[in-house]
Image (tube, rainbow, N blue to C red):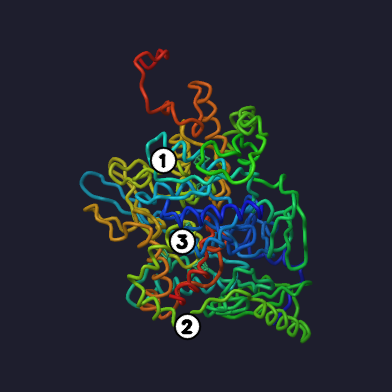
Amino acid sequence: MEEIQNKIRREVVQLLSEGQVDVVIGFEQGSLPLRATPFFLRDIADANRLVWSPFCENNLATYLTKIQGKRVGLIAKGCDVRSVVALLVEKQIHRDHIVIIGVPCQGMVDRRRIEREVDGEILKAHQEGEEIIVEGRDFRKSLPRKEYIYPSCKRCEHRNPLIYDTLIGEKLVEEAERAYHEVEAFEKLSPDKRWSHFSEETSRCIRCYACRQACPMCYCAECFVDSSFPKWIEKGLDPSDVQFWNIVRAYHQTGRCVGCGACERACPMEIDLVYLTQKINRDVKELFGFEAGLDLDPPPPLSTYRVDDEQEFIK
Amino acid sequence: MKKLPKEKVKPFVEKLLQDYEVLGPMETAGFASFGRIMSPGELKLNYQNSKKTPKEAFFPQWEVMFRYRSTGQSVEVKSAEDTGRRRILFGIRPCDIRAALLLDLVFDSLDFKDPYYINKRKGTIVVGLGCNHPASTCFCTSVNGGPFSREGADFFMTDLGDGYLVEVLSQKGRKLLRGFDGKEASEEDKERAKAIADSATRGISSVIEADGLMEKLEKLTEAPFWDFLHEKCLGCGICTYLCPTCHCFDMADEAFDLKGQRVRCWDSCLFPLFTLETSGHNPRPTGRERIRQRIMHKFNYFFYTHKAIACVGCGRCIIHCPVNLDIRRVIDDIHRE
Ligand code: SF4
Ligand code: SF4
Ligand code: SF4
Ligand code: SF4
Ligand code: SF4
């Protein structure tokens, strides 16, 4: 980790000093244990604030559509890079405005799950080899990193950045298979069970839109929930409105979701609806042979039309 | 002062449940939240600040104010407010009580009275619970509060380990003693409570520099500081929706055919719609102006109108911000500017 961190810093110093980028987006030490925080770096003197750790959980590609017009160096994990690819395919960003500093990713740890493993507040955390060590007022506990990575990291098939300008560290052996096991398990449930899971999860939603804001692919200038004319949805917490919001957010990701898990990580109410985007991802893969964020060439299936389309319904 | 042994808590709460709606800390999906409890077993009193705040008891995220119906000739309007409720907020932390006192300044002021808020607030008895182990993110002592501040409580409890030391602090609080089966607290209990409170207060490890903050912000309105502060902010509603003092709302008519309802629901200055005008102009067009509004409102504007800081140091915005944008660091940076 430390070696990777040093390499990142050296790379960034070079990029900035050569004037290749205006700003680098990476991570610095967070203010809480188990946290790193996004860092917009402009001054070489601050390069030693950059960190790389299992706590770098945010998808930094989210910022690319917000920081238009600047040349950005992006410190990017596998899923951040998939988002970059998807944004390029959707023509939201310019490749020549971005320098990708790719970092193969071993998975980011699920801070909330770790917090639940101990009684009392965690005051310190660090990584030691393959263990995450957490300490509190009257405890010290060591947890195997691998077991505590986020569910989205567990099913990740592209830990190595697919495209990059510089790669930091060695490529990892890709190991996940069965990327769709949550949705497969969910499909086996009875309709009643599926409905009760969905309605229970959505009943906690406070419509803070953190899921949308954290998602690199949710970049619409005006989200449907923010449109007041026409008004598609009411503003309150009536279950039908909250459910509608959650379903439409997922559906707007059809053929676009890169499965990074940023939505889940940001949700303060820990709402588990990932099977929705997974289901759609799998359908798009089966129907169109397309997975978002893997390839720069094919146009996204839901925004193209082919005269010789073999599907009957489209003619 | 009285003492309520731990085994007597259950019957005490059961008694309260007969006469009141009781809202308290409970566990939802693995985290502490504030909600209505139906049995004493649901209470989780050893919690560190609940994720959702008790402010919802007075100022729900979403409420129907009135319903209307047109008959063609006339319009019928009917208030949707339930005025007969008797409620208890049980086991609420001192910072959250202080937040209610700040909300009182907004919704129950000399020149403006909000009947929906006031009705719920007046019908509620506040049972405070001291914080034996404040979280590392708590900075209540920097903003005129404290882990054992009794300000605003009708009834106050200190966890002594084997029971609670109970103090009645108002006429409203006295009513609760009717179902009370505890004994007088001993001198030793009182001393123990004092020691716990002192050590908790000393244990507050976070501070913000509130002195001079308002004046400092005054000079910073157009500073480049804001250009960079907002960069990592996602512009979500977490830090405002989970803040016990935030009180912005929007009103909307949900109408269909000849009938409808007017609802009021929370709004957040971090949202793009917050001050969007009909013309399409938005005085707060980007994250820069939005996060500035959040900071300015809490530490400057609110001070102007109400002579208080609109932050009680509960730390929720620190813990739950998805990008770890920490208000303590923001304030440190402001002082450094
Ligand atoms: S919907 Fe969620 S998992 Fe999919 S791209 Fe957006 S943030 Fe990532
Ligand atoms: S982040 Fe969670 S609580 Fe917030 S709108 Fe999304 S699903 Fe709802
Ligand atoms: S919770 Fe964090 S990311 Fe969300 S609006 Fe507040 S400061 Fe920004
Ligand atoms: S601003 Fe943050 S610390 Fe202050 S009262 Fe609100 S949530 Fe608590
Ligand atoms: S303006 Fe912002 S910070 Fe102030 S009360 Fe409203 S939502 Fe909270």
Please give the chain letter of the residue carrying mark 1. Answer: A
Q: Above or below — where is A278 with respect to B305?
A: above
Image-quadrant location for residue B218: bottom left
Tell me the CA gap for discs 2 and 3: 23 Å
The N terminus of chain B is located in which quarter? bottom right
Q: Could you say where residue B57 lies in the image, as x and y percent from the top left? A: 51, 62
Image-quadrant location for residue A102: top right
Mark 2 residue type: Asp
* Mark 2 or 3: the one toward you: 2
Label 3 residue SS:
helix
Residue B148 in sight here: yes
The C terminus of chain B is located in which quarter? bottom left
Residue closest to the eye, A21 or A306: A21
Circle 2 is placed at which residue position? Answer: B211
Circle 3 is placed at which residue position? Answer: B240
Q: Residue at x 73, y 84 (%)?
A: B190
Q: Could you say where residue A168 lies in the image, as x and y percent from the top left? A: 59, 46
